[in-house]
Image (cartoon, helix red, strand yellow):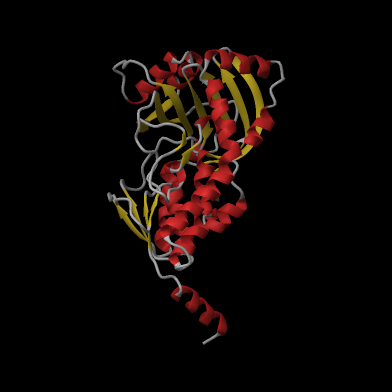
Amino acid sequence: MPLAWGAALDSLASLKHPISIAGGGLAGLSLGIALQSRGVSVTLHEASTYPRHRVCGEFISGVGEETLDALGIAGCLEGATRLQSVCWSDPAGKLAELQAPGRGISRWKLDELLQRRFLAHGGTLLTNSRIPAASGVVWAAGRPRQPSPWIGLKCHARNLAMTHDLEMFTSPGGYVGLATIEEGKVNICGLFKQRRSTGAKGTGLLLAVLRGASLNALADRLEGADLEESSFCGVAGFQTGAQEGPSFRIGDAAVMIPPFTGNGMSMAFESAECALQPALNYASGRSSWTEAGAAAAAVQADRFRRRMTTANLLHRFLLNPAGLKLLGALARSGCLPIQAILHLVR
């Protein structure tokens, strides 16, 4: 037997413990791919099915190629739409333009690509399946439900002319981003303060909420486009920031950055990378599950500390009338260091 093959078999033999993952979103699937490709037996439990729409900005910005390579998922993003230009506006008009290299891809497409890669590596995927927290279970089941004043809404649009690759709109009632994705479509996703029900549903609810947030010009634009009702989805009952839950958690189950930053999808991938070595240490018997969870949490806390501090401060300003007025005045005068702030949340 060649020496290389013997070493590989010895390495596989040293992996004593299988790992389960609760949640098949970006973080769960990415970690599952990375572990399975390294010889760890992984069973992934996804509460829903693939493909499906999710409330997500569908804009990937800030993640390094080294992270994608380490996870073994770079190929899944090869077909993503390359984005560069960004425009930031408020109800009174344009505030600023900047450059923010990124990729646009729908979760419908990306989740499907990732789950196929996970299966190709021999992973076990159980859909419509939930698993309780336990030793050996990485918690990637998303944001825990808790009282919240926020509601997230999302849908896709066709025949919507864009001024920039990514358009961001802010108001005291919330903020929304438009990102170009595959097939000439545009993803529309926003975070809004919940208001008394208007009786509207689906994309009609999105338009009503935009008008309630004083983003009337944007609502007029969207009414002239072809909104895909089948892509509409919403989520409520969540808070941004650090999340409570089982000791070994990743992705939004660990920490959720305010959506305005456009860094949520990248953080899901980075979170999986942070958890990779601790999970391997557990699988090989070099650490206990408690030690592995603590190590993953420490790496994530260190990696995300600066961007979370900046993003939470920015979030409070953006959703406070006085704060938003101040930011708007600074942006229009050219005194707001937007590119520097963008760097701080990457």
Q: Is residue 298 visible?
A: yes
Relative horizontal placement of residue 7, taking residue 203 as reference (left or right): right
Residue toward you, 194 or 101? 194
Residue in view at x 33 percent, y 15 percent: 196
Relative horizontal placement of residue 53, taking residue 328 as reference (left or right): left
Residue in view at x 65 percent, y 14 percent: 329
Relative horizontal placement of residue 177, taking residue 25 as reference (left or right): right
Relative horizontal placement of residue 62, taking residue 144 as reference (left or right): right
- Count the marks: 0
Residue toward you, 199 or 252? 252
Residue 159, horizontal then vertical, whole percent: 48, 28
Q: Residue furthest bottom?
A: 1
Residue 113, horizontal then vertical, whole percent: 44, 52
Residue toward you, 288 or 257? 288
Query: In the figure, 47 relative to 231: above or below?
Result: below
Residue in view at x 31 percent, y 47 percent: 47
Residue 177, horizontal then vertical, whole percent: 51, 28
Residue 308, horizontal then vertical, whole percent: 55, 36
Residue toward you, 284 or 218? 284
Query: In the figure, 128 relative to 84: above or below?
Result: below
Report which quarter residue 2 is drawn in. bottom right
Q: Is residue 229 visible?
A: no
Query: In the figure, 319 relative to 291: above or below?
Result: above
Report the quarter where the C terminus lies: top right
Residue in view at x 57 percent, y 12 percent: 92
